[in-house]
Each structure stands twice: as structure tokens, then as C-alpha cells.
């Protein structure tokens, strides 16, 4: 069974970047990816933890530089490797649709 490699980027105010990558169960179709793109804040930003994806920054949070927003990179590739997160392509799309226009950037996680 094919699975999707998802890629997204964390960028802090000092332009420090950290690429995040995970494998989800199933294939993300072009239509599904268009739906996800349509749910992003300002056409690029989202909060991974609010859609079931892990978040990796640089280890410690600097309140002067860090925030909760990540940049969606999309489906990077298809793979036969096992999923690294417990979410299907369909559920990921549903989670994005549930957050469209309702991203909660008031909560911070300590990393």
C-alpha cells in the first residue's frame, strides 16, 4: 500500500528553519491537497498539532522569536514505508476542513 510523505516547515522570527516530515497512511489525491491548501491561513500557514501532525522546532521556545505557525509544504512523495503518525489521508483532510478559518494561535506548547 502506498503512503504519503508530508513535509512542512517551521520558521521563527530570526528565520531559523526546521523541516518537518512524516508519513501518513494512504494517498493524498490532487483534490485532497487542493482542499488542504484552501484551509491554510494566508494560503500557507497552519498549526500541525491541530490537525494531528507532529511539531518539531529547535528544542526550546524563545518567546521573542517563536510562534505556533508552520508553513505547509505539501505531499513530498509516495512511499511503501510504514506511517510514522497515526492518521489517514482522509482524516487529515477532515481535520484541515474542521480548522479552516478557526486556527487557535492562543495556545503554546512547551517544546
Image (cartoon, rainbow, N blue to C red):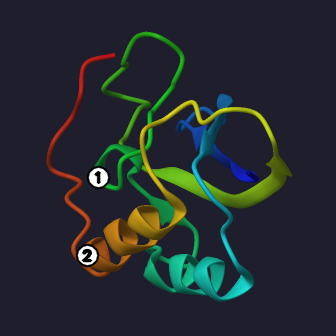
Residue toward you, 5 or 109: 5
Q: Name, please, the residue furthest toward the front.
A: 1
Residue at figure coordinates x 40%, y 11% from the top left: 60
Residue at figure coordinates x 53%, y 63% from the top left: 89
Which quadrant would residue 103 be assigned to in this image?
bottom left
Q: Which residue is mark 1?
A: 50
Residue at figure coordinates x 66%, y 29% from the top left: 18
Q: Tell me where residue 46 appears, x and y as whole percent.
A: 44, 60
Residue at figure coordinates x 33%, y 66% from the top left: 95
Residue toward you, 85 or 62: 85
Q: Name, please, the residue furthest toward the top.
A: 59
Asked if 67 appears above or below 6 in the picture, the reply is above
Q: Are marks 1 and 2 in contact (CB under 8 Å)?
A: no
Q: Earlier in the sequence, mark 1 or mark 2?
A: 1
Which quadrant would residue 44 be assigned to in this image?
bottom right
Q: Tell me where residue 64 appears, x and y as whole percent.
A: 36, 28
Is 61 left, or right, of 28 in this rendering? left
Q: Which residue is mark 2?
A: 98
Is 31 left, or right, of 62 in this rendering? right
Is 50 left, or right, of 104 in this rendering? right
Characterize the local packing of mark 1: few (<14), some (14-19) or many (20 or more) Cα atoms within 10 angstroms. some
Q: Tell me where residue 11 appears, x and y as whole percent.
A: 60, 40
Q: Tell me where residue 52 appears, x and y as whole percent.
A: 36, 47
Characterize the local packing of mark 2: few (<14), some (14-19) or many (20 or more) Cα atoms within 10 angstroms. some
Asked if 46 appears above or below 42 in the picture, the reply is above
Tag 2 secondary structure: helix
Residue toward you, 35 or 104: 35
Cα separation between marks 1 and 2: 10 Å
- Quadrant where the C terminus sits is top left
Tag 1 secondary structure: helix
Which quadrant would residue 100 be assigned to in this image?
bottom left
Total numbered labels: 2
Amino acid at each position: 500500500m502506498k503512503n504519503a510523505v508530508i513535509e512542512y516547515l517551521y520558521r521563527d522570527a530570526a528565520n531559523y528553519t526546521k523541516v518537518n516530515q512524516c508519513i501518513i497512511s494512504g494517498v493524498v489525491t490532487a483534490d485532497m491537497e487542493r482542499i488542504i491548501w484552501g484551509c491554510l491561513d494566508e494560503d500557507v500557514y497552519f498549526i500541525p498539532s491541530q490537525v494531528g501532525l507532529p511539531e518539531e522546532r529547535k528544542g526550546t521556545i524563545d518567546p521573542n522569536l517563536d510562534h505556533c505557525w508552520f508553513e505547509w509544504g505539501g505531499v513530498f512523495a509516495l512511499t511503501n514505508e510504514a506511517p510514522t503518525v497515526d492518521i489517514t489521508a482522509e482524516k487529515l483532510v477532515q481535520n484541515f476542513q474542521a480548522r479552516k478559518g478557526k486556527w487557535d494561535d492562543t495556545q503554546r506548547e512547551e517544546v
